[in-house]
Image (cartoon, rainbow, N blue to C red):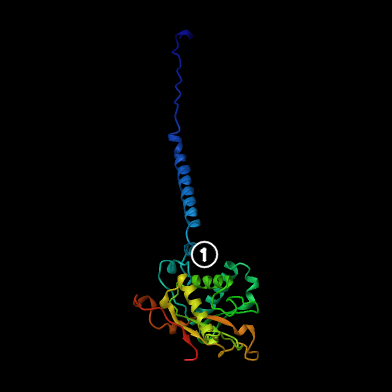
Amino acid sequence: MPADSQQPIIVIKKITHGGHHGGAWKVAYADFVTAMMALFIVLWLLNSNQKIQKAVGGYFNDPKGQGKMVGSTKSASGEGMSVSKEDMANLKQRIEAAMKKEIKDFDKLREFVEITVTEEGLRVELMESAKSTFFERGRPEPTSDGKEVLTMLASQLAHLKNRLVIEGHTDAKPFGTPDGYCNWELSSDRANAARRLMVSQGVNPHQIAQVRGFADQRLRNKQEPEADSNRRVSVIVRFEDDLGPDPAKAAQGHPEPKAEGGHH
């Protein structure tokens, strides 16, 4: 067959498109929306109160809700947790860790704070120094350091079922005013001032089992009755077995507990 009589060969190329870029834009858009949501959550937290910030932070520290302190999933949801005798040591460690983390210049206060497990429960003692560390000298009003420590304690204890006892103590130095105000009133008033502050920071009023004022009748340092460490306020977390009536079931109209003078 002659060469010029052959049929021409036609080559057809098929042009394909990326099919909406493969959907990669959807992934990028989802990342953008997630980032914006995270930004709004951060902005909301920055403008929320301290209690909410601690609860959210506590959740991320204990997402499984195994902790018995504020911020766990159980306590944050409003379900009060109780601390048994076996768990008091763990509670002690949590409070000590919170103090180191949340209280500024805690190193200067460390020697005036003692946390021990006693027969009655976990006792947190705030002892005075010669410069009046936690309460104004001869007055029931807390100092700025006292307010900071009591606020921190309230945040740690507010979501427990365990009842709380607050005590006030003085040294044996003679103290009194022309109107008869003496160590009995001072010890009771300091304990009551601590109660009011902790209640204002989230502690249920019915969680307070007792407010006691002992004046100089229960000296911490009996060898030195006038020692500064005898002036102190103690917050006691009662054992689970000593809970008494559930504060969550207490009548809303009940008055808040009044101070008990140790001389009665």
The quarter of the image holding the N terminus is top left
Secondary structure beneath label 1? helix
Q: Which residue is mark 1?
A: 61
Q: Residue at x 40, y 69 (%)?
A: 78
Q: Residues within 10 Å of mark 1 (few under 14, many from 20)?
A: few
Relative to residue 114, is residue 25 depicted above or below? above
Instruction: Report x, y in % for residue 82.
Output: 44, 77
- Locate residue 249: give its quadrant: bottom left
Three-letter residue code for mark 1: Asn
Instruction: Report x, y in % for residue 70.
Output: 48, 69
Instruction: Report x, y in % for residue 195.
Output: 48, 77
Q: Nearer the viewer, residue 27 or 189?
A: 189
Relative to residue 225, is residue 250 depicted above or below? above
Q: Nearer the viewer, residue 188 or 237?
A: 188
The residue most toward the front is 178
Q: Nearer the viewer, residue 63 or 20?
A: 63
Residue 157 visible: no
Residue 207 visible: yes
Horizontal side of 212 relative to 97 (left or right) equals: left
Q: Nearer the viewer, residue 11 or 143?
A: 143
Instruction: Report x, y in % for residue 27.
Output: 46, 43
Q: How many marks?
A: 1
